[in-house]
Amino acid sequence: MYTSTSDAPVSARTTQDVLNELLVGHAAHLYAVDAVLCDMTQPQPVQGREAILAYLSVFYGGAFRNVSVKPVTMMVNGSTAILEFSFLGTHSGPQLGMPATGRDVHLHLIAVYRIEEGLIRETRLYYDSAELPRQLNPDS
């Protein structure tokens, strides 16, 4: 279970504070109620905190277990944060129309966050959308 590492009021959290907490876990309290997540491989953005959390839950505890996120590069400039990271997990549930394979996956992603008043307002997620299917079904 995620526990906040910051005792600061939401509005007093810096962009770096939010990014640091995000690395600990995708916690609902980090996203604004009206936040938007743009997965650049998808035609439509995900809108609203609850929809974003449902979207992320597929990766963090839904279709994957033993998940870890390894930061590679973090950059913060004002209200913008850029995080390059690796996602590692074991495919343990349906994903991309494929039943659980038990295979370990290792994905490389970049996320650009706009953080205002201590909350994530917008996320833009960039990654190779063909990488996951290649790792889940390497024989195809």
Image (tube, rainbow, N blue to C red):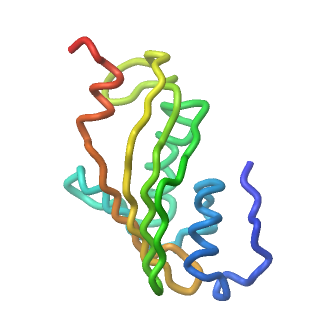
- Which residue is rendered at x = 30% and y = 18% of the image? 137
Residue 40 lies, with reference to residue 14, above or below; the image says above
In the depicted structure, whether residue 97 falls above or below residue 6:
above
Relative height, residue 115 to residue 132 (above, below): below
Quadrant in the picture for residue 10: bottom right
The residue lying toward the viewer, choosing from 1 and 21, is 21
Q: Residue at x 55, y 79 (%)?
A: 15
Residue 132 picture location, percent across and down: 33, 32
Front residue of 87 and 31: 87
Out of 114 and 75, give the one closest to the viewer: 75
Residue sitting farthest toward the front:
73
The residue furthest right is: 7
**Residue at the far top in the pictured view:** 139
- Quarter holding the C terminus is top left
Q: Quadrant of residue 2?
A: bottom right
Q: Could you tell me residue 96's position as x and y percent?
A: 31, 30
Q: Is residue 61 left or right of residue 40?
A: right
- Check the image and report above or below for 40 versus 105: below
- Please give left or right for residue 137 compared with residue 35 in the image: left
Residue drawn at x 64%, y 87% is 11
Where does residue 46 sit, x and y in percent of width and height? 35, 59
Q: Position of residue 35 (x, y in %)?
A: 44, 71
Count of numbered badges drawn on the protein? 0
